[in-house]
Amino acid sequence: MAVSLYQIAIDCEDAPTLARFWAEVLDWHILYEDPEEIVIGAGPSALPGIVFLTVPERKAAKNRLHLDLSPDDRDAEVERIIGLGARKVDVGQGEKATWVVLADPEGNEFCVLRPKKTLLD
């Protein structure tokens, strides 16, 4: 039996704001929206997507799961994402880290990595 990752679910207080932030960060689209959830993705048939689910409680601690982004230019991408509403955070990564830790508008941590070489490089 084959299985594939369909979507990543993110609980949040303000699903419209957070979904639009992540759609802008990833250059994705709003694929579905109702009062309870918003789904974003690269396209209607592209997997995985991300679903933002409205919940009453605020984020309480460091994420147990986070996203890693792999840009062509880490520093330029960090500045672009900060301009969209993210902020830098310290989760103990230290000064020698090759990634930058940011938090989205609701405080969910994610990393922007240095550019990765492809297998063909």
Image: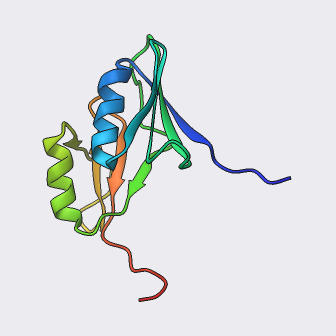
Q: Is residue 24 above or below residue 75?
A: above
The spot of residue 108 in percent (x, y) is 36, 36
Q: What x and y, as percent, mark residue 41?
A: 45, 42
Instruction: Kindly tell me whether residue 91 is visible in this rendering.
Output: no
Quadrant of the rendered image containing residue 16? top left
Q: Residue furthest right?
A: 1
In percent of the image, x 27 and y 42: which residue is there? Answer: 24
Question: Residue 34, image x and y in percent?
Answer: 46, 16
Q: Examine the rendered structure and indicate whether residue 13 appears above or below residue 97.
A: above
Does any portion of residue 8 appear in the rendered image?
Answer: yes
**87 on left or right of 52:** left
What residue is shown at x 30% (from left), y 64% (from top)?
Answer: 71
Position of the C terminus, as image quadrant, is bottom left
Q: Residue at x 34, y 40 (%)?
A: 23
Q: Residue furthest bottom?
A: 121
Residue 29 on image: x %, y %: 38, 39
Colouring mode (rainbow / by chain / secondary structure / one colour)? rainbow
Q: Nearer the viewer, residue 31 or 101?
A: 31
Q: Is residue 69 above or below residue 39?
A: below
Query: Residue drawn at (80%, 54%), measured in percent from left and top?
Result: 2
